[in-house]
Image (cartoon, helix red, strand yellow):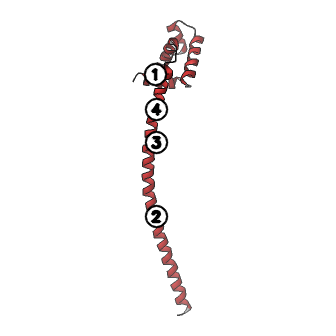
Amino acid sequence: MTTTDLSSISFYGLFGAFILLLAFWLLRSALHSSDHKRRVRASKDLRVHLIQVAQSSEISERQALWRTLTARENKVARLAAQDKTDMEIAQQLQISVRTVESHLYRVYRKLNIRSRHELKYIVQHLEE
């Protein structure tokens, strides 16, 4: 055998090994991809379930907290959840705007919320 024969055998041997490795890599990628898609689908299903459980437990927890409100705090909170301004609530209940603000401050603290948007969400779910 000549040197050119040996070099061509080496080249084709390396080329064949490369093709074989490429085939294995593609097969592994395909299997990994389908497994990955399955795991992503399963994690999305789990995430949806966990969010539903968290929301239901959060709502029942907030319902328990809602019962700690005084009658006046309850009334002010419900009016605020109806998108009424502090001034409108004060006029309707015949109290000062500052008193409305104080009631809402205590409502937010008791319910562990920070906005009227959250308050509106809680009130809507209390009625379900």
Q: Give the label on residue 57, or none.
A: none
- How many other residues sit within 10 Å of disc 2, few (<14), some (14-19) or many (≥20)? few
Residue ranking furthest to the left:
128
Decide which of 66, 78 is in the foreground and name it.
Answer: 66
- How many other residues sit within 10 Å of disc 4, few (<14), some (14-19) or many (≥20)? few
Position above or below: 87 against 39: above
The alpha-carbon separation of the residues under discs 4 and 3 comes to 12 Å
Q: Secondary structure at mark 1?
A: helix
The alpha-carbon separation of the residues under discs 3 and 2 comes to 28 Å
Q: Are marks 4 and 2 in contact (CB under 8 Å)?
A: no
Kind of residue sitting beneath label 1: Val
The alpha-carbon separation of the residues under discs 4 and 1 comes to 14 Å
The alpha-carbon separation of the residues under discs 4 and 2 comes to 40 Å
Q: Give the label on residue 123, or none.
A: 1
Q: Give the label on residue 55, or none.
A: 4
Residue under the image location 46 percent in, 27 percent down: 59
The residue to which callout 2 is attached is 28
Kind of residue sitting beneath label 2: Arg
In the rendered structure, which disc, 4 or 2, sits on the residue that comes first in sequence?
A: 2
Q: Position of residue 44 (x, y in %)?
A: 44, 45
Residue under the image location 51 percent in, 85 percent down: 9
In the rendered structure, which disc, 4 or 1, sits on the residue that comes first in sequence?
A: 4
The alpha-carbon separation of the residues under discs 3 and 1 comes to 25 Å
Is residue 88 in view from this perspective?
no
Kind of residue sitting beneath label 3: Arg
Q: Secondary structure at mark 3?
A: helix
The residue to which callout 3 is attached is 47
In the rendered structure, which disc, 3 or 1, sits on the residue that comes first in sequence?
A: 3
Position above or below: 31 against 113: below
